[in-house]
Image (cartoon, rainbow, N blue to C red):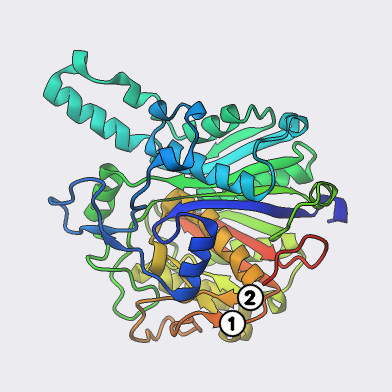
């Protein structure tokens, strides 16, 4: 890829269980903070589990100006708008410049959309009757609403897309955004993911018995399931040329990505790990890097028994003996599994690791599993200089996405 088409990240924003902003998120990652706690967003009394990675004390009025029509926003819309405003402010693009609107697009991954509000509408209808129910609760039902809100709020006229590939959606949105800029279809993209907690999602994972009753323990011998969470994660992507011309700071470079499908099972990964391995190989090929260039792997690491052993197998297949000398960690142990937002959120994790020169830990790990025998960074964050980070997102339906982020050394680089 020539220099003109190198794609860099110039702004980031998030709302998640361990960070209401990028600075807070970075501190929590370095300190190994756990955001998995009792849920109070809805009643969990009838479920076998009661914990999750909820965004606590989220008041949209503190993050989003009234001009953006808060009353008609779902929780997903509000979370994504709050993160978008932070990302654009971080990138020096808020208020958004008129001359950039025509060639700026939006790509968002998600899953539940406005289901939390739809649940409230249905409950209200059962109690009060449909004539007295607030149909405005349904105005942001669809997953596309978050991308629509961001685009319309800033009058952006470039490409717009929503991805619903389950837990890989946020990562896929980043890759798609990068491709649009490389292909000349946009100069700048606002991309990422959002996932609100809701009863239906919580019930579904409880029904599958894939949720830990306490806290998730990725790669631990006694792991018994994931912890569900919610988050928004928005990144500003643009060409290196555009970023330099406007004097933007640069967190790092999106060097390449890979997307594959298992075609195996709706909820279980292919234990042969071929799809996950192909995703990583495709990302390496796209980035022009080799296994020797990767200094940290941000694992999908959900803490389900099959996922963690399968991902470990895939890493060893791709990296060979090199796999044993690369730190691997799952930050889901801190912020929980945020489903459609997770790939974008962990993209932010990867970029913070590059900029701040550290590898975040896998917390809650206690006992070694013979099938999970890599370096999972279980004794706290590790200070180290990183050149390239590979981030995996392996989803239900066999949707695999791997994104590689690289350190940027030139004008505007963010290093600490």
Residue nearest the observer in this picture, 353 or 19:
19
> Where is 114 relative to 28, above or below?
above
User: Which residue is pictured at 36% across the width and 55% down the height?
Assistant: 229
> Where is 179 relative to 406, above or below?
above
The answer to whether residue 210 is visible is no
Position of 404 with respect to 141 (left or right) is: right
**What secondary structure is marked by label 1?**
strand
Q: Which residue is mark 2?
A: 357
**What secondary structure is marked by label 2?**
loop
Q: Which residue is mark 1?
A: 383
| Residue 342, image x, y percentages | 47, 55
Local crowd at mark 1 within 10 Å, few (<14), some, or many (≥20)? Answer: few
The answer to whether residue 392 is visible is yes
Position of 34 with respect to 147 (left or right) is: left
Q: Locate the C terminus and report the quarter of the image it occupies.
A: bottom right
User: Which residue is pictured at 38% across the width and 39% down the height?
Assistant: 75
Q: Earlier in the sequence, mark 1 or mark 2?
A: 2
| Residue 137, image x, y percentages | 32, 26
Q: Locate the N terminus and report the quarter of the image it occupies.
A: bottom right
Q: Quadrant of residue 332?
A: bottom left
User: Which residue is pictured at 83% across the width and 52% down the height?
Assistant: 244
Position of 367 with respect to 410 (left or right) is: left
> Where is 160 relative to 234, above or below?
above
Do labels 1 and 2 touch, CB within 8 Å? Answer: yes
Residue nearest the observer in this picture, 364 or 66:
66
| Residue 191, image x, y percentages | 60, 45
Q: Quadrant of residue 413?
A: bottom right
User: Which residue is pictured at 49% across the width and 62% down the height?
Assistant: 25
C-alpha distance separating marks 1 and 2 = 6 Å
Residue nearest the observer in this picture, 115 or 300:
115
């Amino acid at each position: 890829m020539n220099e003109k088409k190198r794609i860099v990240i110039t702004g980031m924003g998030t709302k998640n269980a361990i960070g209401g902003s990028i600075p807070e998120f970075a501190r929590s990652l370095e300190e190994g903070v756990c955001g998995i706690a009792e849920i109070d967003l809805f009643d969990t009394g009838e479920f076998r589990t009661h914990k999750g990675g909820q965004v606590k004390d989220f008041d949209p009025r503190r993050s989003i100006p009234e001009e953006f029509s808060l009353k008609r926003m779902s929780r997903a819309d509000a979370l994504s708008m709050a993160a978008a405003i932070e990302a654009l402010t971080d990138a020096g693009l808020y208020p958004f410049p008129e001359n950039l609107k025509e060639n700026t697009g939006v790509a968002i991954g998600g899953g539940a959309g406005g289901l939390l509000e739809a649940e409230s509408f249905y409950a209200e209808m059962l109690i009060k009757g449909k004539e007295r129910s607030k149909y405005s609760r349904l105005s942001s039902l669809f997953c596309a609403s978050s991308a629509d809100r961001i685009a319309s709020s800033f009058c952006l006229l470039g490409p717009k897309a929503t991805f619903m590939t389950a837990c890989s959606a946020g990562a896929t949105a980043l890759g798609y955004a990068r491709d649009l800029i490389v292909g000349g279809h946009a100069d700048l993209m606002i991309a990422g993911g959002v996932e609100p907690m809701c009863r239906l999602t919580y019930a579904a994972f409880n029904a599958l018995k894939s949720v830990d009753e306490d806290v998730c323990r990725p790669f631990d011998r006694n792991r018994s399931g994931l912890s569900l969470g919610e988050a928004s994660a928005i990144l500003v992507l643009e060409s290196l040329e555009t970023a330099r011309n406007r004097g933007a700071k640069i967190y790092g470079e999106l060097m390449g990505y890979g997307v594959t499908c298992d075609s195996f099972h709706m909820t279980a990964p292919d234990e042969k790990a071929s799809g996950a391995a192909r995703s990583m190989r495709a990302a390496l090929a796209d980035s022009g890097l080799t296994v020797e260039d990767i200094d940290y792997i941000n694992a999908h690491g959900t803490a389900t028994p099959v996922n963690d052993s399968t991902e470990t197998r895939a890493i060893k297949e791709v990296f060979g003996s090199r796999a044993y000398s690369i730190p691997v960690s799952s930050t889901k142990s801190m912020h929980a599994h945020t489903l459609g937002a997770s790939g974008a959120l962990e993209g932010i994790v990867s970029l913070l690791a590059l900029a701040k020169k550290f590898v975040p830990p896998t917390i809650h790990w206690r006992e070694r599993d013979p099938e999970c025998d890599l370096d999972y960074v279980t004794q706290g964050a590790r200070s180290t200089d990183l050149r390239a980070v590979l981030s995996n997102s392996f989803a239900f339906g066999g949707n695999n996405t791997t994104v590689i982020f690289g350190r940027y050394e030139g004008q505007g680089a963010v290093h600490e």
